[in-house]
Amino acid sequence: MANQVRSALIQCSNPINDESVPVKKVQQAMLDKHVPLIEEAAKKGAQILCLQEIFNGPYFCPGQDKRWYAAAEGIPDGPTTKAMQELAKKHGMAIVVPLYEEAMRGVYYNTAAVIDADGKYLGKYRKQHIPQTSGFWEKFFFMPGNGGYPVFQTQFAKVGVYICYDRHFPEGARALGLNGAEIVFNPSATVAGLSQYLWKLEQPAHAVANGYYVGAINRVGTEAPWNIGKFYGTSYFVNPRGKIIAEASEDKDEVVVADLDLTMIDEVRQVWQFYRDRRPDAYQDLVRP
Amino acid sequence: MANQVRSALIQCSNPINDESVPVKKVQQAMLDKHVPLIEEAAKKGAQILCLQEIFNGPYFCPGQDKRWYAAAEGIPDGPTTKAMQELAKKHGMAIVVPLYEEAMRGVYYNTAAVIDADGKYLGKYRKQHIPQTSGFWEKFFFMPGNGGYPVFQTQFAKVGVYICYDRHFPEGARALGLNGAEIVFNPSATVAGLSQYLWKLEQPAHAVANGYYVGAINRVGTEAPWNIGKFYGTSYFVNPRGKIIAEASEDKDEVVVADLDLTMIDEVRQVWQFYRDRRPDAYQDLVRP
């Protein structure tokens, strides 16, 4: 007996690529651009939606410019979480909202707020793995997350979040599975070149190893002034068998929708008894400081 | 500056598929069949060779027949390790030798002995993850390994071993990387159907996540009396970028040879600082019993 959940991802290019425009105005423009896409997801019947990494602005980490600290806000007390709670309630749709979080003055995280379909704030995930490499100078902007690998019981499914660079680390993907995730969303920002050939390797592997669905979101477009390359979109859903079941284009703003049959999680886990056969007693190497 | 190591894998079908033949005779026939293939690997200049899972016999786990307990022997004191030490020394080639191990009377492991190019026995790896599912009733035959994830310094590279079903578990793949493996060999026995679409997903993902080479070996042919399907060969090497660089056929006895440039390990790790950015402090979920 199928237990379908209709889920959606949004990839959306940044409309303002002009350094002279204040950060808050850029954010407002990006939020405004998302509203009709969120509405489109709702009209298509989506029950759980995830937006892209730090969705309400450009991916500003190709530089190390203090001006972008102003993009951070409290979660859940900042305005964007509140606005999204309204939208979630209006549409009866759970929403995962990746945001730049200010936890205290001068302390920032790369975070996602999880909001249920009745508008209730369920909690947040703070990105655990922070890159520092050409084009991705994130250690300048974010503390490594300190909240573990929480899973959120929405009205429709148990949802986990993993953010961008996190996807290269099998450990957190496993922790999310152990904690009960049925769908793991990974909002990302990644450009053609270095990582593209890994885009459909690592996350399908996580889906298989852990027996859950993954919804992977990437940006589209090119963002000034950094121009590090084209964000190649191709946001997708992959099922617990490792098969990609829905995928967006490389270059258009787009809502990807897929029906996720949660009973496949049980089917797959009954065939592949990976959780039964794990060896937690033999994994001490992984937690050695 | 390249630091090439020439490495080889052997896939080899079982010549005797007749239950009336004694176990030891079957093993001798399989060993005899391997000798010229090992010689071929040496002639091709291989410096490190890995054989298939429990190489000297059929994959007997589609049944649960006590008669196959007789296939087990001591490591390194049994005759096969000794014979392989001779061959390693003769050819100046390190050899990874997957065998059915008798650790004490009635206690068995699915093991690989690692022998250096001068014939010296370096140690063994005992398969950590044991399946028990249709066609793969391994909990009848093997205790789960108790020796962690050792890495062996051969004359040519640091070698780790992961065996068959182990490949579905990212944890041990990571432990081998943390322990210094440059090449991880995974001798397997897997048939068309269930796992084939995963064959080139999981292990390339391990290679990428951990920045090392993987040499994956599968059997070929069909084995009676079980006839669970065709072992689909396609033994391959994959580099730390996740690209398959050499691959065998689906159905022939074959020696796969590839030059592995160990400097690529450094190149990749300098681009992707996954070891630097891991969060051992945040992985406690993985070792919870």
Image (cartoon, coloured by chain):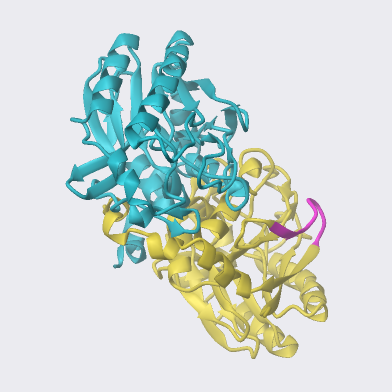
Chain colours: A yellow, B cyan
Res. B50 visible in picture: no
Q: Is residue A150 left or right of residue B282?
A: right
Q: Which residue is located at x 59 percent, y 53 percent?
A: B194
Query: Whole-percent x and y of residue A56?
Result: 67, 67
Could you tell me if residue B107 is visible in this image? yes
The residue located at (53%, 83%) in the rendering is: A122
Give the residue at x 39% y 67%.
A146
Count of marks overlaid on the render: 0
Residue closest to the eye, B52 or B62: B62
Q: Is residue A247 magenta?
A: yes
Q: Position of residue B160 (x, y in %)?
A: 35, 35
Instruction: Give the percent coordinates (x, y) of residue B65.
Output: 37, 51
- Say which quarter of the image contains residue A237: bottom right
Q: Nearer the viewer, residue B248 or B138?
A: B138
| Residue A87 occupies quadrant | bottom right
Q: Which residues are magenta?
A: A244-253
Judged by its main secondary structure, the magenta piece is loop
